């Protein structure tokens, strides 16, 4: 069972470069999320998509854009990478987005911006 | 704004023994959900257990149980009969039951659990 698949697993960028992190889920979930994880901190929500065709800002959206390409795929784009965006990025999904729902996570992308 | 605090950056326990991980939170809401997630070295977050605030009974999942003290805003995780596979980072998280909560899970900073063989 694939679950939530993220690519790439590791990436090194130079300041100012752009890139897109890809995420796909095969569980027919409606809601998808992008988080970042920094050392000594909990996860912080960047953007989420409650359902296909909708996206909304989370706690730390600055410097990022997202696209909900279809029900399966939710991508995160860094237009002009900055060292402050060095982090581990997680994509997650849930069936309906209800508050008590379990989130299913990908295995993360380790991004370093030099 | 809600906050979640995990005051133990690291805990260690002997294999087969019991360990308790602490979590406190701050909220003015009466209805919410609390979660414990595990992050093994593979990095993938896995739900361990969840608790609904309106339920007085503590949640249990096999060797994992919680001590939910709503008045004290405390939500600790007890792991019984610790196994080597339990070694991981453990994160406590809060989610409002309000519809306008923007799907926001509020996460603690995590506790690293070490299992000694």
Image (tube, rainbow, N blue to C red):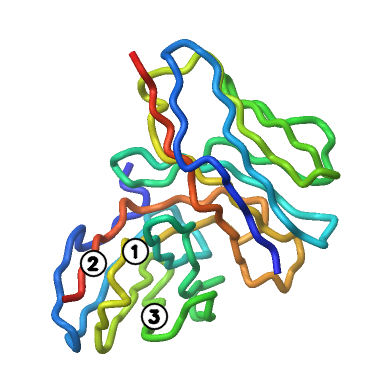
Protein chain holding label 3: A
User: Percent from the top left, x then y, of residue A14?
Assistant: 14, 80
Among numbered discs 3 and 2, the one appearing first in the sequence: 3
Q: CA distance from mark 2 to mark 1?
A: 7 Å
User: Percent from the top left, x then y, of residue A93?
Assistant: 47, 58
Give SS at disc 2: strand
Q: Quadrant of the N terminus of chain B?
A: bottom right
- Please tell me which residue is depicted at 49% across the width and 57% down the height of the picture: A42
Picture quadrant of residue B57:
top right
Q: Which mark is residue A33?
A: none
Q: Is residue A64 left or right of residue B2?
A: left
Answer whether labels 3 and 2 touch (C-beta < 8 Å). no
Whether discs 3 and 1 lie on one chain: the answer is: yes
Of B95 and A87, nearer the camera is A87
Give SS at disc 3: strand
Q: Is residue A23 left or right of residue B82?
A: left
Answer whether labels 2 and 1 touch (C-beta < 8 Å). yes
Whether discs 2 and 1 lie on one chain: the answer is: yes
> For the residues carrying marks 3 and 1, which lies nearer the camera in this image?
1
Of A9 and B22, nearer the camera is B22
Q: CA distance from mark 3 to mark 2?
A: 17 Å
Q: CA distance from mark 3 to mark 1?
A: 13 Å
Query: Which residue is labeled 1 in the image?
Result: A89
């Amino acid at each position: 069972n694939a679950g939530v698949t993220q690519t790439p697993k590791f990436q090194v960028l130079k300041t100012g470069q752009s890139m897109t992190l890809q995420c796909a889920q095969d569980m027919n979930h409606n809601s998808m999320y992008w988080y970042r994880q920094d050392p000594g901190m909990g996860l912080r929500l960047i953007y989420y998509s409650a359902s296909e065709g909708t996206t909304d800002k989370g706690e730390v959206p600055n410097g990022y854009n997202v696209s909900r390409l279809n029900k399966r795929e939710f991508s995160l784009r860094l237009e002009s990478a900055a060292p402050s965006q060095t982090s581990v990025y997680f994509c997650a999904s849930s069936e309906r987005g209800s508050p008590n729902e379990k989130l299913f996570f990908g295995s993360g992308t380790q991004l370093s911006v030099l | 704004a809600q906050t979640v605090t995990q005051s133990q950056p690291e805990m260690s326990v002997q294999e087969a023994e019991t360990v308790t991980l602490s979590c406190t939170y701050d909220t003015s809401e009466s209805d919410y959900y609390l979660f414990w997630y595990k992050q093994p070295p593979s990095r993938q977050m896995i739900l361990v257990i969840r608790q609904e605030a309106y339920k007085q009974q503590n949640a249990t999942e096999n060797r994992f149980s919680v001590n939910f003290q709503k008045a004290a805003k405390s939500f600790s995780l007890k792991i019984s009969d610790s196994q080597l596979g339990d070694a991981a980072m453990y994160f406590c998280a809060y989610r409002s039951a309000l519809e306008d909560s923007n799907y926001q899970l509020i996460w603690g900073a995590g506790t690293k659990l070490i299992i000694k063989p």
